[in-house]
């Protein structure tokens, strides 16, 4: 049943490969910058769950719109703080000197009501003023009006003109100052954008380096056994779907040999499947520091970076994968040496350029590389083009029908596109190939919540937590269990009319909760 969607695409309907190629013969509209979210399928990162989009408002939107050409690899706030503070100080002085005076002046002018006496700014009685004006030139007063009516209109006109001129002057000065301020800020931004050696950027880059160190588990019973080959044992556990044990064995392997590129790669992949993306990114970056051309690590890293909302870095990882391929490297016009964490903002130009390179290979290639399809699927997820991403992953699955990672990514993409029922089928297929795939089990729970199947969601979350709990070892802590899964379990339980379970979830009593839902402990 789970394979039906893919098979029908080949036999009963349009083949996914044909459908995918059709996307590239159509006009592609403007790609959205950033990621989008809808419903409970979007509780986390892409490919295991969705991600939240961002929107700018007010003057910030206006300013960013005017400066779109600024490169995405610059920090989003690269302006000189001294100049900005001076500008803000100037604003305060302007309103202190003029704004307060204007408010005092306007407040002294009363609101004119139809039946009220007209009072001028100096406090002169309107009737006395009218008589004074009438006595100066009574011949100018029309016989059709009562004495003093012309003076009253003149006074009213004078007051209105004074108020209008004052307000116009203040608004004009304020608007001019506002335009100057934003122009100066834009000039600062542009200057900084072209200056990679600016001290502020260097300080920022040196200080901000996430995922630079891998955090090992404090207690690792596997490391105590020196009579086994930790790497080979870890591979076997990974094949069996025992992710927690595989993680412990791979950690033992890299502690024994810190330059073991393969061990770092497998550790990163195991942590990603274990719903621990930050740890996965650290391990994969360590692998790439030993071998920057390791394409498997680059593709896995692109997924984890997307999950953690590092969109620009995901594009860079996909670019490096392409440029390090012997058949596709010529497509990359501007190769990069390493992934930069200066800014996670993904500009439209960055995303479009990376996508174009992958699409170009599909157009020119004699056969469809599933890795190209997978990379393109990630890119379409980044832009929110979920239907195109679905076709990419389906095309990749034609060559690798038993790849649980691809089935999970297909499921997450379907969920992101509000197709939760289809997503459930894809997740079940992935779990048929890898029963211990914790990330996929968690994703299945999220889709169950979205379909209002709360009891089933809780059961999947508890199963995932029990799988993770097996990796704690004797005297271990709960640190290896995902807090994201616990939070989702609390949400699912809250929809079930069982207030007595709240205390158990707050205490993280896995054994008691598992007994309540008839989930067998795996420990």
Image (cartoon, rainbow, N blue to C red):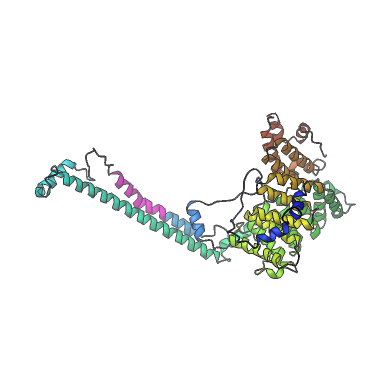
Classify the position of the C terminus by image quarter: top right
Please name the residue shown 11% across and 45% down the image.
Answer: 143
Residue at the extreme right: 227
**On screen, 496 above or below 7?**
above
State the image coordinates of residue 425 (x, y, percent, origin top left).
75, 46
State the image coordinates of residue 292 (x, y, percent, origin top left).
73, 64
**Number of numbered discs present?**
0
Specify whether residue 264 is in view: no
Is residue 118 highlighted in magenta? yes
Please name the residue shown 30% across and 44% down the image.
Answer: 107
Q: Main secondary structure of the magenta part?
A: helix
Residue at the extreme front: 12
Instruction: State which region is magenta.
Output: 90-119
Left or right of 122, for residue 322: right
Please name the residue shown 66% across and 49% down the image.
Answer: 416
In the image, 419 versus 233, the foreground residue is 419
State the image coordinates of residue 467 (x, y, percent, origin top left).
79, 42
Left or right of 211, for residue 472: right
Quadrant for residue 493, please give it: top right
In the image, 90 versus 3, the foreground residue is 3
Specify whether residue 180 is in view: yes
Is residue 230 highlighted in magenta? no
State the image coordinates of residue 510 (x, y, percent, origin top left).
76, 36
In the image, 366 versus 432, the foreground residue is 366
């Amino acid at each position: 049943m789970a394979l039906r969607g893919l098979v029908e695409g080949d036999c009963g309907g349009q083949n996914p490969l044909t459908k995918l190629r059709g996307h590239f013969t159509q006009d592609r509209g403007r790609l959205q910058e950033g990621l989008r979210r809808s419903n409970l399928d979007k509780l986390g990162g892409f490919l295991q769950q969705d991600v939240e989009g961002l929107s700018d408002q007010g003057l910030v939107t206006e300013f960013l719109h005017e400066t779109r050409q600024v490169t995405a690899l610059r920090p989003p706030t690269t302006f000189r703080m001294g100049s900005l503070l001076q500008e803000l100080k100037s604003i305060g002085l302007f309103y202190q000197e003029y704004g307060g005076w204007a408010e005092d002046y306007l407040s002294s002018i009363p609101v004119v009501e139809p039946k009220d006496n007209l009072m001028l700014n100096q406090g002169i009685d309107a009737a006395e003023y009218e008589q004074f004006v009438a006595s100066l030139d009574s011949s100018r007063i029309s016989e059709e009006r009562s004495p003093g009516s012309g003076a009253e209109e003149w006074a009213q006109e004078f007051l209105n003109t004074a108020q209008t001129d004052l307000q116009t002057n203040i608004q004009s000065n304020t608007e001019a100052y506002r335009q100057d301020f934003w122009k100066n800020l834009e000039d600062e931004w542009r200057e900084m954008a072209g200056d990679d050696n600016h001290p502020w950027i260097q300080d920022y880059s040196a200080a901000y380096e996430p995922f630079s160190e891998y955090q090992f588990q404090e207690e690792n019973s596997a490391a105590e056994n020196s009579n086994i080959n930790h790497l080979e044992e870890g591979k076997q556990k990974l094949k069996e779907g025992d992710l927690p044990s595989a993680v412990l064995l791979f950690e033992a392997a890299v502690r024994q040999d810190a330059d073991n590129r393969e061990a770092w790669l497998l550790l990163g992949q195991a942590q990603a499947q274990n719903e621990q993306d930050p740890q996965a990114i650290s391990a994969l970056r360590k692998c790439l520091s030993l071998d920057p051309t390791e394409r498997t690590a680059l593709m896995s890293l692109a997924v984890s970076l997307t999950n953690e909302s590092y969109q620009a870095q995901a594009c860079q990882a996909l670019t490096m994968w392409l440029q390090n391929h012997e058949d596709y490297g010529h497509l990359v016009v501007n190769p990069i040496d390493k992934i930069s964490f200066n800014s996670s903002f993904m500009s439209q130009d960055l995303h479009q350029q990376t996508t174009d390179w992958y699409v170009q290979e599909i157009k020119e290639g004699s056969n469809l590389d599933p890795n190209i399809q997978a990379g393109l699927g990630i890119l379409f997820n980044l832009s929110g083009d979920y239907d195109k991403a679905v076709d990419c992953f389906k095309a990749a699955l034609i060559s690798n029908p038993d790849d649980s990672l691809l089935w999970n990514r297909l499921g997450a993409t379907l969920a992101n596109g509000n197709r939760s029922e289809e997503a459930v089928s894809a997740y079940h297929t992935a779990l048929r190939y890898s029963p211990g795939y914790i990330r996929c089990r968690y994703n299945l729970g999220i889709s169950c919540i979205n379909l209002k199947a709360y009891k089933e969601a809780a059961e999947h979350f508890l199963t995932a937590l029990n799988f993770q709990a097996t990796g704690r070892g004797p005297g271990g802590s709960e640190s290896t269990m995902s807090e994201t899964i616990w939070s989702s379990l609390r949400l699912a339980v809250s929809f079930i009319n069982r207030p007595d379970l709240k205390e158990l979830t707050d205490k993280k009593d896995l054994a008691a909760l598992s007994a309540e839902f008839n989930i067998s402990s795996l420990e």
